[in-house]
Structure formats: structure tokens, C-alpha cells
Image (cartoon, rainbow, N blue to C red):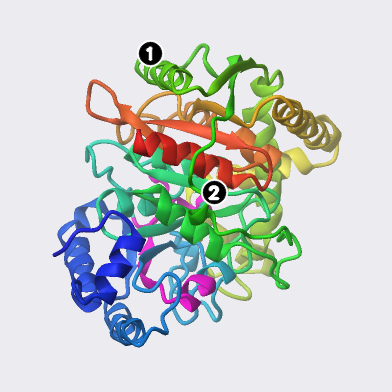
Amino acid sequence: MLTYSNHQEKLLKLTNKELSLVDNVNHFLQKIEKNKNLNAFNFVFEKDAINDAKKIESKIYSGKAGRLAGMIIAVKDLLSIADKPTTCSSNYLKYFTSVYTATAVQKLIDEDAIIIGKTNCDEFAMGSSNENSAFGAVLNPIDNSRVTGGSSGGSAAAVAAGLCDVSLGTDTGGSIRQPAAFCGIYGLKPTYGRISRYGLTAFASSFDTVGAFSNNVYDLASVLSVMSGKDEKDSTSSSNPVIEYAKVLESNKFKVGIPKEYFGEGLSSEVGNALENLISKLREHEFEIIDISLPNSEFTIATYYILTTAEASSNLARYDGARYGQRAKESSSLINMYKNSRAEGFGSEVKRRIMLGTYVLSHGYYDAYYLKAQKVRRLIKKDFDDAFSKVDIILTPTTPTTAFKLGEKSADPLEMYLSDIFTTSANLAGIPGLNIPIGKDSNGLPIGAQFMSDQFDEQKLFQAARFIEEN
């Protein structure tokens, strides 16, 4: 099995017949089987992947292959693929098969990427540890006693364990960046609207973002260019021009903002020290380090959970047992069918968030909670607007600690929610964020740094990441 550092090198080896794509796919399939204990995949598409490899290999040899020819990609089981299961890791949809393909996935297929399977996740993307899945928890490849993070834990584990080249995840409040940090890989949440959400099962529609995981910056940049762009099927997708991010990776010496609110109480000393070392190295390489303030940061977790649970309450109302998914077998009335179907189909965390969302939207509480949270969201966005008038990118920790043990926070939802304390702000503001692996703690667990930029400035994140990757 020949190794390759990124897809550019892999494609060259395929073109020169130094690497067989069929053998390459079989290598990944064998590795997935050997690592079944990680529980990273809900479904693996062995026959389809091998058949696709044969067709794409011929296209490569004839010079007619797409930009991502031969890239092996795993897809979070929240994105639709025609004629394949889409369960959202929930018992409610355990027998559901998609009738169409999500735009983001279809764009990858059109450029000759190979979809190798669907990855495990927290049920309906609700969780920070990938322990809320009807398929069971995903184990961290670095230390199997630890969580991968969530909700895209299966996608993160698949890349970290070398089970695919790239994986797709979704990020509503940190669900790509936090697992990427826990697993020691790159994880990108793009600008809201950069990638179409068509075919993505909705959790919180004004927050949900499709993104990706990779072991290197080049592949992440390549995949973003392919998936991005306006989609007539998604009115929230942006018509902003799409650039070839992989061609503009040469780094500039940026002005880097360091928000004081992210370096206080709750941040582990080892994560804090790793960030301070990174800041020192950036300063040595002539990056301008500027202290900034994001004064409304203390309200991000409360604002995030009020707004996302409200949206989840509305989005999940469609799961009523009448049209698709779980239906209770014995119900004395229509209302009982709704209740029983949801009681049998949904897990405890999904039920908790539906109840919270219904509460904050209810009469007498709407103004006190939901409306007030929308106003605070606007203030958080203004904090970032003010900051980006002074700096190019913002550097923060991705998570307060390294990966915690399985079951450690399951009994305390509030403690679990605080795992996302550094990531939710990017979703509230609609800006892009990227996790970059920067080292390990004394237990050998990965530490991640988060870079954030202004809307549609993803190239700055890639350039900063590439600089760190090379230096």
C-alpha cells in the first residue's frame, strides 16, 4: 500500500499507475472492518465503493476524471444519499431510506469522489460526545476509553483512524470543530450559507452547517471548493463567488486577535499552555498579535441552547408517526399515536431539547427567553464585526479540555453543554471556524486551536492552518 500526504499526491500516483484505486478502496474497507470496535460507521457501502473505483479508475486513465477522482469520503448519517439509509442515528428513522441525494454529497460524487459509508453521530446531531446514538457510542481512536466528541464523532473517528481520506460532518454549535480537537485532526465549519443544506436533516435551521474533516489542509480546502456555491434548492445558500481554496494556501502574516474572554476560568492549564506556545511562535514568525475583547461571550451558551432548542422543537414536529419513520403499533387516538411514536423513537437527549424548545416558545415565555436570545445573538454578531475591523483572524482554544472519558458527563447535561463553550459563538454569528491540531497533553490526548475569520474568508483560515502545518 503506497502512502500519500494528500489527494494531489494520491491522484498523481493513480494517474501514473503507481497506485490501484480498487486496491486503495479495499485497503480502507479492510481497515474499517479491523476497527469495527470504534463504532465509527453505521453503514458501509462495500460493493458500491468497489464498483465506483473501477469506473473512476478508467476515467483517470482516459483523462476524463473529476477534481476529486479517487478521494474516499465518509458521510455523516444526517445527509441524504439516494437509495441509502438515513437514520440520523435514531430509532425513529432506523428503517428510512432516502429518495434523493444531498447537494453537498452530490457535488462530491459529480467530481468522482467515492462514498464509502455513513458515519455514526449523536441522534439528530444533538450531543457533544457521540454517546447519544441509537447505534451506541463512538470510541476515540487515540484512547478507546475517551469520547470522540459530538455530534459528528463518527466522522472524526473515521479520519483520525485512517478509515477514509475525508469525512463530512455537520456543525450546529461546534459539532465538527470539537470532535476534530478531541481526535487530533482538522475540522472546518464554513460560513453559514457557504454550502447548501438541501438534503441535510434539520436540527436548528439557522445554525446548521455542512463541513468536513481531514488529516491535512489541502484536502479540506479542495473539498470546500467543490461543495460550496448557490443552490436553487436552498434559499439560504449564498451566491458569493467560490474560489479554489487549495490554490491560495500560501500564508500571509495576519493580524491575529486573542480574545481575553476565552482564556479564563474553566480552561485546562495544558490546553492554555499549548495555546500560549502557539501564540509565541506566531509572534516569532511576524504575525501581529492583538488583544481583543468579545464582551458578550459569557452569554453564548445560554443564547445558543435557547435558540437551537426552539428551532429543534419546530423542526422535529414533522416526526409524528403519520408519514415516515417510527409509528407506534397500538394507539387509541391520533394524539396517542403522536405521543407513543415519539416516546418509542426518540432518545432522552432529543426529548429533552424538544421540551426545552417548546417551553421557550410557549405563551408567557417567548419574550422572556426566545426574543431576548435573538437580541443577544445580534450583539454577539456585532462583537465579531467590531473585532474583524481590527484583526484578520481570531485565535481561541477549541475546547476547554482534551477528550473526557466515556460516561463522565452523561449524568449532567449542563456540564456536557459547556463542552461547546468556545465553539457556539461562530454559529451564532454565522462565521467560519477551523480546528487545527497543535499538540498533545500529558496523557497523549490531542489539543486543538480554533481559528475564526469573517464571513466568507475561509481562505484566511486555510492559510493560517497551512503555515502551522508546515512549521
Where residue 403 sits in the image (x, y, percent)? Answer: 34, 32
Neighbourhood count class around disc 2 (C-alpha, 10 Å): few under 14, some 14–19, many 20 upward: many
**Which residue carries the number 1 mark?**
269
The residue at which mark 2 appears reads as 350
Q: What amino acid does circle 1 point to? A: Ser
Secondary structure found at label 1: helix
Q: Nearer the viewer, residue 267 or 111?
A: 111
Q: Position of residue 40 (x, y in %)?
A: 31, 55
On screen, residue 114 versus residue 459, left or right, reads left
Quick one: quadrant of the C terminus?
Answer: top left
Q: Is residue 237 magenta?
A: no
Q: Amino acid at mark 2?
A: Val
Label number found at residue 79: none
Residue depicted at 46% across the width and 82% down the height: 83
Q: Nearer the viewer, residue 118 or 252?
A: 252
Is residue 341 or residue 196 the one in the foreground? 196
Q: Earlier in the sequence, mark 1 or mark 2?
A: 1
Q: Is residue 29 left or right of residue 405?
A: left
Q: Identify the magenta region.
A: 106-135
Give the image location of residue 382, x and y in percent: 78, 30
Q: Position of residue 204 (x, y in %)?
A: 65, 50
Left or right of 330 on screen, residue 467: left
- Closer to the eye: label 1 or 2: 1
**Residue 178 can be seen in this image:** no
- Identified at 50% across, 62% down, the residue is 78
- The quadrant of the rendering that contains the N terminus is bottom left
Residue 115 is covered by the magenta coloring: yes
